[in-house]
Image (tube, helix red, strand yellow):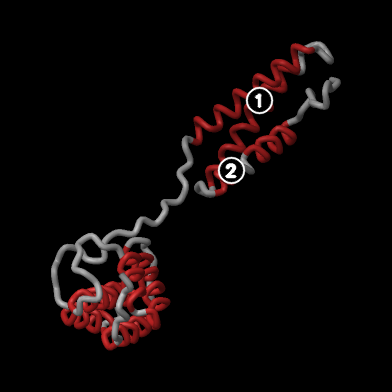
Amino acid sequence: MTARAGVPVDVGRDDARRAAAEELADPVYAEAEPSLPARVVDWIGDRLADVFGLLGGLPPGGGAGLLVLAVVLVVLVVVIRLRAGRIARPARLRPGRVFDGTVRTAAAHRQAAEAAQARGDADEAVREWFRAIVRSLEERGVLDERSGRTATEAATEAGRQLPAEAAGLRAAAALFDDVHYGGRHADLAACTRLAALEEAVRGARPRPVPR
């Protein structure tokens, strides 16, 4: 067979698989389960091989063959998308509230953090240390008592009045979100840093906020 406009008509099974692989080079496929692209490549390679086998019976250089090839390629791309479905991208972190609705004092959160850290539960210790920080700031009037405040909001607001601790508060808020809402795990070193931050914040004197 001959080719017109640079489009090969006589394409073998290997070429079909390469064409499918190029389609699947779209970054969205890379975020899917590892086995999905392989299955789609195999399936599309088989379908292309079947179609090109049928096209082999058309007259050499026939415009009809090229037209059929173009239509088939478009249809196959659509089929790939439909068979694979809308490939979900990784869920983005959606930070929520610092407190879970149970009202406890800063001292109670501090005790819970120390107990969790002592038994090696770093994730729970991180959550409770950060809650102890925020509750302490509320009790001292550095932060107003507001339900629904996120970790980032608490760190940002407190950082304005405690500039020396602002960076530590932001890092602590990010760690809290990663552990509590992002499903990540902390280590005891992180607990130690939050315990030190809690002590520093508890003794820091707030700077008046300009009106």
Work out whether residue 61 can be spotted: yes
Q: Dot 2: few (<14), some (14–19), or many (≥20) neighbours within 10 Å? A: few
Circle 2 — which element? helix
Circle 1 — which element? helix
- Closer to us: mark 1 or mark 2? 1
State the CA–CA distance, disc 1 to disc 2. Answer: 19 Å
Q: Which quarter of the rendering shows the C terminus?
A: bottom left
Q: Nearer the viewer, residue 140 or 47?
A: 140
134 with respect to 46 (left or right): left
Query: Residue 163: x and y, percent?
Result: 39, 79
Query: Residue 117: x and y, percent?
Result: 28, 82
Q: Nearer the viewer, residue 142 or 39?
A: 142
Quarter occupied by residue 200: bottom left
Tell me if residue 182 comes above or below residue 195 in the rendering.
above
Q: Which mark is residue 38?
A: 2
146 with respect to 71 (left or right): left
